[in-house]
Each structure stands twice: as C-alpha cells, then as structure tokens.
C-alpha cells in the first residue's frame, strides 16, 4: 500500500477488499461513574457483567398506563462504580496497543452525556492515570530497547514517513537544533512535570511480550481538537505578537493517494519516552477549550483526538543497521478520541458562544449517529446507501476505520443520576445500534523475508569475538592503547637503526631482516586469526542453521498454535456475540409479548364494550320501535277522536245556523204579512206593486248580520280575457314540495313548462313566463289553489326578475253542505251577488336574484 520511498497509513495495499473478508463487531463497553451525593436518586442498575437496567425516576411516567418502564441494555462488558483505571485498561486499551505494535490500526473513543466521566476515563488524574498515559507507558516499555535514533524516520507532510541513514539523521538533528524557530522535541532527560509525574505507578507498568526485536521503532504523536466543526492543531507554536495576537488557524482534511483521511499541516512530534509523550499531550491539553456550565464545572467544548503513530522498519541481514529499503517501512496508528458530551440547552442554560458550541457538539454527535445507522442498515439489509461522512469533521476524519480495517472500541460513560435519565436513554439506544456495525478484521503479515533473530546473533557474535580476543591476549577493542602496546611488544624487537658511517652495510640488512621476521610473524598471526575466524564463523553458521531449523519448527508450531488460538478466540467471540444477541432477542421478545398481552387485553375490553354497546343499541332500537308503534296508535286514536269532534261541532254549528235562518225567515214572513195587510187596507183593491230590487237590496243590507264589504280597486285588466297560460311562451312552473295533489277532474296544464320545486336562475333564464301554485285553506274549510302568474325579464346586474301580473283561483266545494233556496226577486239574492269575491289582483310585486361576483 505504500508508495515507493515512503511509509503510509494504514500499511495494507490499496486494492478493493474481497467481499468475504472477516469482520468483527464494534466493541462497546459501558462504565458507570459514582453518584455525586448520597441523597441523589439513581436510575441505572448493574445487573451483570454485561447488562445494565434503567429505571425511570420518580415523577416520570414512561408509558400510557402510568407504570414505570424498565429497560435493559447489553454490552461487551460493563464496569461498575468500583472499577479501577488499570482494570479498564487491561480489558479495553491493552489489546489495541498490542495491535499497534503488530502494525494494526485502532480507534478508541469515549461517548456519553456531559459530566459522565469521559475525560477522566481517557486522561485520568494524578495517581489514577487514564487510558491514554497507560497506553503510552505500555508502548515505550515494550519498544524501548529497540527504538531508532531521532530523525531516522521523517514525516513527509503527506500522511507518510521517509527513512534516512544515521548520518542524515545526525545532520537533521544538528539542523533542527540550530533553527530556533522550529519547536524542539522534548528531551527524555528533562525532569517530568509534577502534574503527570505520578500518573502511573511502577507496580502497574506493563509491556508487550511479542515485540519483533529485529525491527527499529519510532513514535510520533499529534494532538488536534474539533471546535465548532473546525480543526485546530493544539501542538502548533505560532509566533506570539503582544500587539496583535493572531487567533489559531484552522486545518483542513485531505485524502492521500490511498484514500486515507489526514489533517494537512498537523504537527507530528517524535518522542522517545512516556514522559516526553505525555508532556506533549499536556502541552496541547492546556490549549483545549473548556468552559463552566450548569452541569459541569470543566465541560469540554470540543472533540479532542490524540494520535499515536508507530513507524517500524526491519534490520538488515547483519542485524546491525536499519534496512534501507523504504518499501519495508510500516506505519500503524492508534487514535484516542475524547468526544464532547451531548447536552440540552434547556438544562445548561447556555447563551451566546456556549449556545453555539452546544449546537455544534450536538450536530456532530447526531451526524455520528446517522453514519452508524446507515452503516448498520447497509450491512444488515444489503443496501448501498451513501454514508454521510462529510457532514461532520469527526465522521469524515474516521471514515477509514469504518470503511477500511482496524479495531474500533467505544466506551459509553454513564452518569446514574435521575436528571440525566432521558439523555442516558438516547445514549443507550445509540450504543445498542453501534454494536451491530462490523468492521474488517486486520490480518497478520510478515514484514520481510529475512531470518529472525538477526539482532541477537549480531550481538552474540560481537560478544564472542571480544571474549576470544581476551582469552588469546589479543585486543578485544582496537581503541584500547594498553592492548595495542601489548601486541606491539609481542613482536621481535627492532635493532638500532642509527647510521654514522656512509660505508656501514650491516645496519640496514639487520633492520631489513628484523622487519621481515616481524612481517612473517604478523602474517602468521593474520593467518591464525583468519583460521580462527573462519572456524568460528563456520561454527556460528552451523549453530545458526541449527537455530534456524529449530526456530522454523518453533515458528511453525507457534503459527499452528496461534491459528488454533485465533480459531478458539473467534469461536468464543462468536459465541459471546450470539449469546448477547440471543439475550437481546429474548428481551425484545419479552417486551413484544408483554405488548401483545396488553393489546390483547385492550382488545378484549374493547370487544366487551362493543358487545355491551350493541346490546344497548338493540334494546334502544326495540324500545324505539315499540314507542313508534305506541305513538302511531295514539296519533291514530287522537286523529279519529278530533275528526269525530270536528264533525260533531260542524253539524251542531250547521244546525244552529239553520235554526237561526228559519227563525229569520219566519220573522220575515210575519213582517211581510203585516206589511201586506197594512198596504191592502190603505190602498183598497189596487194591484200591489212589485217591490223594487233596490228597496229589497237595502232591506237585505239592513237584515244582514255580516259587515258590508270594503270597496275594492278596479282590476288591472278589467276586460274578460283568455288565460295567458294557454299561449306559446315557455313557462317556469313553480310547484312547492309542500303542495297536495287533488284528485279533481280539472287540473291546470301548462305546455312548454319547466317544472321546479324551487326557482333558480338557470330555469328563469330559459323562460319568459312564471307561475306559482299556492294552496291555502278557504274560509269555508275547503282547499283552494291560486295560480300566481308573472313576466320574467333581465335586470341590469345580469340577474332575472319576475313581475306578477295575474292570479287565478281554483276552488273546490263540497255538494253535501247545507244550502238555502232564494227567490230570484228577493233582496238577499242581490246581496249575495255583491259578496262574490273579485279574483283580479290589484297590485304586482317582483323580486330580483343577483349573480355572485
């Protein structure tokens, strides 16, 4: 996966991964912090080592029946209030550090409500170091003897590392020391800061036993925070300007050639000890944004990410120097994330910048929940929805862990006080959903093909050579002047070489002879040394081959054992996962069963209520029918009774009127007889005159008991005319629904008429004439029908108006009624003729219908 000449993160090649790659679920743990006071109400109970139960606090009704609802949640492991920091580290962070040393990536983050103990879990306090300082301590305890010198590994500012020789590293060191503007790497010889000097006691120190001693290691750390969805480098040292202090500049996320996300321009500091690393962390921690809120005195207002990057490269075949093959450089990293706590502004009473910070924190956590939910849906349902990593810097930075490979661990911190019950419920639901997300399982791969144990063989060779040289009296160290003098004294002594005579021919030959003897001794010593070295080398090679064979055999057995162990661990983890899933499903089944029982009970009660109401309705209907029948009988009896009573009264009235008329007739006859007798006595035998009609009319008027009729106005059309309804015009025949049908021979028939029960504008617009059939009860008790006629014309407003012009009356009389015979010449006949009703109207009326605008 690495580019030529550079080490990249992660170390795996970039091609697409196979679909059948092994995956492990995200490990979710729960830690319960102690209550702040003894009088506080607790809503969280630890049932077992992997299950907790939430109780609704007093005053909060969790369901519609008003009962308290208790919910249970399962985790990989639950840590109670008495759990120590070392126990938490052994179960959660230690395996991640082991994987970091074996070139595997890891992500560990804390999640929970504000004030639930996330920062304490990650950082700790003096005497109780958190996961971060313990992880650093274990890392340096494991790789301490095998660390490379400073600046052998060099960041390339593109999420990779370059390797350089010892000479180049020394020059780089001198160059960095000479530049005052560049921040110096903390020295391990400096005295530790008392704020974190006692974080971890020596009794709690631990180390990894499976470190590859044929590699050289270097550790780089970086520390960033995500504040208001902007990334800031907490280790950046900007020049201080007391006049115009500049705010810190935000960083951007970039993607390297292997599609891994990293923070561009982030400061990476090389550290060589736990104290150095934690000093760098504490330096950035002091720059982190915290504030005092209603819920937490020191509330984190940003998400912090502390990254530990481990670079390792193998030694050469001699085991003396780092292999200068840059493709063999492997980089792994462990991210320790302290997420800011979710909070409700109604409880914190945040205002201004605090309110804006809370909104950005909640938004980023909501984006994290959304990404986890979409990942879970894609994995469980086989969908391919796009995960919205880019909606937040937190999710965008860690998308490689969920889409790539590496272990992901989450610690859910819970505050058991009753005030945080609702927020804790949301956290538990998110944790339950996160456990169902799976990430690719990292695979062990060899770093290079060189034989193992090169470092120890090289050291053993040096030690054996020094020992043999000491046994032979030879120099074990060429730099020791005493050993060099002893070697020179073992050679033949040189004769005097002073020449005083030019003719001296003995001094030079004698000197040459001694030098030749010394040369022969030196050659003999060299040959003996070479023979000894050759024999020693052959022995070492023989031992090496035997050792390699044994190592190969042990390695094979160890690999088989590791495979068996992995298989057992996988089966155990699978069994645990299935057990947890079974418990979860059983719990859900219990909840569904309770819900079903409740619904069944509600259904039965509703069914009983429905049957009761149906029976009541049937009783009411039967009672109503009986009441209707009884009322119909009463109405019939009452109607018959009143008909008989009316008939009796009418007959009595008719008889009374007939008697009165008979009395009047008798009186008239007597009066006539008297008048006739008196006139005959006065006139004698003259022929009596016929009484005039005028006199009889006046007399009849004087005798009549009824009032005289009022004078009426002349009719509109005094001439006799034929009914206008017989014309060829089109009529609107308005017959109200309340009119009764009379079974008479003569019926008003109007041709070309539109019959309506209620007049409307549409019918009036199609006709020129209008007639209204009006029925009323006449004075004699009979029903008469009036035909009120009129003309239809348009108005200025666009509507229709009717002007009434004529009235026709249709009257029906009963022939069985009493009648009186009148003489044609009597005065009563003339009076009766004048009492005939004039049917011609005296006035006209109109109405107008306007259209709606």
Image (cartoon, helix red, strand yellow):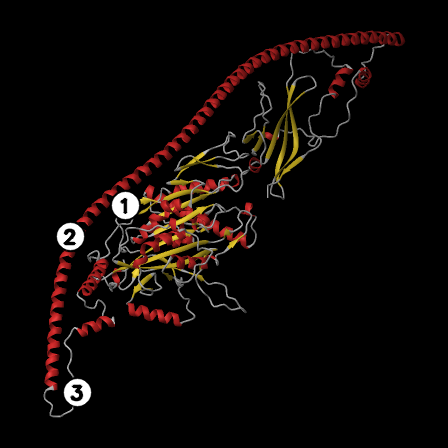
Q: Earlier in the sequence, mark 2 or mark 1?
A: 1
Q: How far separated are the C-alphas under marks 2 and 3?
A: 63 Å
* Disc nearest the viewer among 2 and 1: 2
Q: Quadrant of the C terminus?
A: top right
Q: Residue 511 lies in what quarter of the image?
A: bottom left
Alpha-carbon neighbours of circle 1 within 10 Å: few (<14), some, or many (≥20)?
few
Mark 2 touches mark 3? (CB < 8 Å): no
Query: Considering depth in this image, is 582 or 181 the residue closer to the camera?
Result: 181
Could you tell whether 352 is left or right of 816 in the image? left
Residue 277 x, y percent position in the rendering: 40, 58
* Disc nearest the viewer among 2 and 3: 3
- Where disc 3 sits, the SS reads loop
Which numbered circle lies on residue 22?
Answer: 1
Residue labelled with disc 2: 549
Q: Relative to 784, does residue 560 appear above or below in the rendering?
A: below
Residue 528 x, y percent position in the rendering: 12, 68
Q: Residue 787 lies in what quarter of the image?
A: top right
């Amino acid at each position: 996966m690495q580019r030529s000449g550079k080490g990249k993160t992660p170390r795996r090649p970039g091609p697409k991964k196979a679909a059948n790659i092994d995956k492990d679920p995200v490990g979710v743990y729960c830690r319960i912090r102690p209550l702040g006071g003894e009088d506080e109400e607790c809503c969280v109970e630890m049932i077992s080592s992997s299950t907790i139960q939430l109780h609704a606090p007093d005053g909060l009704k969790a369901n519609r029946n008003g009962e308290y609802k208790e919910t249970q949640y399962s985790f990989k492991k639950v840590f109670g209030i008495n759990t120590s920091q070392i126990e938490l580290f052994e179960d959660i962070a230690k395996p991640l550090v082991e994987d970091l040393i074996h070139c595997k990536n890891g992500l560990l983050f804390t999640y929970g409500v504000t004030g639930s103990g996330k920062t304490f879990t990650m950082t700790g306090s003096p005497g109780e170091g958190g996961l971060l300082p313990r992880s650093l301590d274990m890392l340096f305890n494991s790789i301490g003897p095998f660390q490379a010198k400073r600046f052998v590994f060099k960041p390339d500012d593109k999420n990779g590392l370059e390797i350089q020789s010892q000479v180049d590293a020394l020059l780089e060191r001198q160059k960095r020391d000479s530049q005052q503007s560049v921040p110096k790497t903390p020295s391990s010889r400096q005295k530790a800061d008392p704020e974190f000097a006692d974080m971890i006691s020596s009794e709690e120190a631990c180390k990894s036993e499976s470190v590859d001693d044929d590699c050289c290691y270097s550790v780089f750390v970086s520390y960033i925070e995500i504040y208001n969805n902007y990334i800031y480098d907490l280790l950046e040292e900007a020049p201080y300007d007391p006049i115009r202090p500049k705010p810190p500049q935000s960083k951007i996320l970039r993607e390297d050639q292997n599609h891994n996300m990293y923070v561009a321009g982030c400061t990476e500091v090389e550290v060589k000890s736990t104290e150095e690393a934690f000093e760098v962390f504490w330096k950035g921690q002091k720059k982190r944004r915290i504030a005092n809120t209603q819920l937490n005195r020191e509330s984190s207002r940003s998400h912090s990410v502390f990254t530990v990057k481990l670079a390792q490269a193998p030694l050469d075949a001699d085991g003396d120097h780092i292999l200068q093959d840059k493709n063999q450089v492997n980089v792994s990293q462990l991210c320790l994330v302290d997420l800011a706590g979710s909070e409700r502004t109604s409880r914190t009473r945040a205002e201004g910048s605090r309110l804006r910070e809370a909104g950005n924190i909640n938004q980023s956590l909501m984006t994290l929940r959304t990404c986890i939910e979409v990942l879970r849906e894609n994995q469980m349902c086989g969908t391919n929805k796009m995960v919205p990593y880019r909606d937040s810097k937190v999710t965008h930075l860690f998308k490689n862990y969920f889409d790539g490979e590496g272990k992901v661990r989450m610690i859910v911190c819970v505050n058991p006080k009753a005030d945080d019950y609702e927020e804790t419920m949301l956290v538990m639901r998110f944790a339950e959903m996160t456990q169902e997300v799976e990430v690719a399982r990292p695979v062990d791969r060899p770093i290079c093909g060189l034989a193992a144990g090169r470092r120890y063989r090289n050291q053993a060779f040096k030690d054996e050579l020094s020992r043999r040289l000491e046994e032979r009296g030879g120099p074990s160290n060429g730099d020791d002047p005493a050993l060099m003098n002893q070697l020179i004294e073992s050679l033949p002594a040189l004769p005097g070489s002073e020449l005083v005579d030019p003719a001296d021919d003995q001094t030079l030959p004698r000197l040459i002879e001694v030098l030749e003897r010394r040369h022969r001794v030196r050659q003999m010593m060299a040959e003996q040394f070479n023979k000894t070295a050759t024999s020693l080398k052959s022995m070492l090679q023989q031992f090496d081959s035997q050792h390699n064979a044994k190592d190969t055999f042990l390695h094979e057995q160890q690999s088989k054992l590791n495979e068996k162990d992995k298989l057992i661990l996988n089966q155990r983890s699978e069994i645990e996962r299935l057990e947890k899933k079974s418990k979860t499903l059983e719990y859900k089944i219990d909840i569904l069963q309770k819900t079903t029982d409740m619904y069944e009970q509600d259904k039965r009660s509703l069914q009983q209520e429905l049957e009761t109401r149906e029976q009541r309705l049937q009783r009411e209907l039967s009672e109503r029918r009986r009441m209707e029948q009884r009322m119909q009988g009463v109405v019939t009896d009452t109607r018959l009774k009143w008909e008989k009573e009316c008939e009796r009264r009418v007959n009595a009235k008719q008889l009374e009127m007939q008697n009165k008329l008979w009395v009047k007739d008798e009186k008239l006859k007597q009066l006539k007889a008297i008048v006739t007798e008196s006139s005959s006595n006065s006139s004698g035998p003259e022929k009596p005159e016929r009484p005039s009609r005028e006199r009889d009319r006046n007399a009849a008027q004087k005798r009549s008991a009824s009032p005289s009729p009022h004078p009426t106005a002349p009719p509109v059309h005094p001439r006799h005319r034929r009914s206008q309804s017989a014309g060829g015009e089109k009529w609107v025949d308005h017959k109200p629904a309340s009119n009764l049908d009379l079974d008479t021979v003569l019926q008003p028939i109007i041709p070309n008429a539109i019959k309506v029960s209620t007049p409307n504008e549409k019918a009036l617009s199609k006709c020129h004439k209008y007639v209204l059939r009006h029925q009323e009860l006449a004075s004699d008790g009979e029903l008469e029908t009036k035909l009120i006629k009129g003309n239809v014309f348009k108005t200025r407003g666009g509507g229709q108006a009717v002007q009434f012009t004529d009235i026709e009356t249709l009257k029906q009389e009963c022939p069985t009624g009493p009648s009186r015979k009148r003489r044609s010449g009597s005065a009563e006949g003339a009076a009766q003729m004048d009492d005939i009703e004039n049917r011609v109207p005296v006035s006209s009326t109109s109405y107008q219908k306007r259209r709606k605008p």
